[in-house]
Amino acid sequence: GNYSGPLRPQVHFSPPINFMNDPNGCFLDANGTWHLYYQYNPTDLVAGNQHWGHATSKDLYHWENQQIAIFPDNDTEQIFTGSAVIDVNNTSGFFPNQDNGVVAIYTVNNAVSETQDIAYSLDGGYTFTKFEGNPVISLDPPSTQFRDPKVIRHGDNWVMVVSYATDFTIGIFTSPDLKSWTHASNFSHHGLLGLQYECPNLVEIPFAHSSDSIYLLIVSINPGAPQGGSITQYFPGHFNGTHFEPVDGVARIADFGKDNYAGQFFYGSDSSSPVFIAWSSNWQYGQVVPTGTLEGWRSSMSLPRQISIANVTGTGWDLLSVPYNIPSIFLSQLGNSSNLGNGNLEVNYGSLPSGAVYFQVNVSNASGGGTLNFTFSSSKTRESVKGGFFFDGDFWLDRGGTTGFDNPFFTDKFSTSNPVVSGMFTLEVVIDRTILEVFLDYGRNSATTTFFPTSPLDTLVISTEGLGDAVEVSVVVWGLKDAWA
Ligand code: FRU
């Protein structure tokens, strides 16, 4: 793959060529290597002919492309989304002589059915052999709306969540050996339904600043997101090994942008810091974005995110989402201010090889209004991507100042409400050539937004206005490494 094109993200994963969608089979092995598989069409710039592409990383930012890991058997079937586990104790019997056996659990799609199948890897996840007893779960009568198995370990069992997509139902199955599965319960018609439920994940998740934990069920819907198209929603709740009970009946979405779908948690990472990655696009326009015709690839993943949860009086349940160990890719500091007051900070990053920038703003003693705005722009064409926070609680983003993509579903503006509870909040922003991610208020609200300028953005302005004397604002801007160089 050629990663040097001006639209190519430099700290986000994107496929070498052709079309990528959902993350699949994410796991961390015992040697500290992160494995990312993904829905991949190696022969076209749109979805179809789906395989599992594969890449590995030591830090979740520098990726090494690997050979395609799972292929369809013939041209009438496709390998759809799924997950992977490490079968340390050889429950499956595939691994008599090793404790690093990997089992992939995925959907086989064809014209008449979707079934759940498994494949095992004796070499730590690089090559897979399909189980001769496949499928391990099929429906009678067959259905083409039964997909996206995600498997976790719970007690002495394997537990699968899988979607009966157009029935708005997540099935929960258990297994002692990954081969024989028993249906345990259904989670049905909760939250936003959209047109279908896809890509469920069940994960134990820590409360922020606490050793307590709770379970989290996430369900992607497409189409039918409040913003249009596809989005992920989440349900905090309790899981007893067979049944999931949500804490309440509220629908909550994980991202207020339009480009965060089909996310998956990595198997095998420390349970006190779950790591999540999502497809940064939207089925409304993901197959027609201009990177295809201009550079021969489509879609990137989101940043890896560390996820926790909070339940705060006044604001309620919130998923907290922050970039995973972002200081590991800091290259050089481009600017800072220990107290911006009512002022602005301008940084020109045109000579930064990656074109990727991170900034963090810390605000304390906020009260009585004021705004914080940021603009990334091109000094050549004046195209821009920008956002701003009104301290009384409204955040907005606008990608409409870039002109490289014209599509009715490529909506310009997004907003969310984020009341400031203690007078303190943070804003973290990562921009990476064609993708912007914002994390507001310690990650309480986040948004993932692609954008397509005709000329690279190279100038950042951060400004504040209308702040009272007591408000303190500190800012630091970092240039990021070029992870593909
Ligand atoms: C979600 C999805 C999954 C399916 C895969 C096919 O984006 O539609 O439900 O397994 O993509 O590529």
Image (cartoon, grey):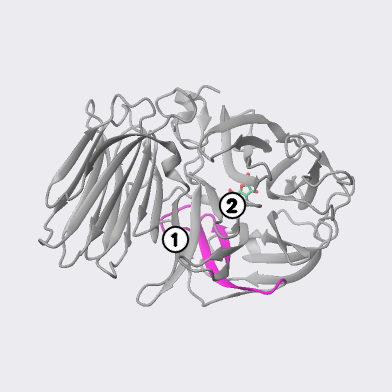
* Residue at (28% x, 67% y) in the render: 420
Which residue is nearer to you in this view: 473 or 221? Answer: 473
Establish if 452 lies above or below 5.
below
Tell me how far mark 2 sits from mark 1, CA to CA. Answer: 15 Å
Q: Which residue does the numbered mark 2 point to in the structure image?
A: 264
Amino acid type of the residue that numbered disc 2 sits on in the rendered structure: Gln
Give the secondary structure at mark 2: strand
On-image quarter of the N terminus: top right
Q: Report the span colored magenta.
A: 216-241
> Residue type at mark 1?
Leu
Q: Please tell me which of labels 2 and 1 falls first in the chain.
A: 2
Residue 124 lies in the magenta stretch = no
Residue 179 sits above or below residue 434 on the image: below
Question: Is label 1 in a helix, a strand or a loop?
Answer: strand
- Which residue is identified by label 1? 320
Mark 2 residue crowding within 10 angstroms, few (<14) / some (14–19) / many (20+): many
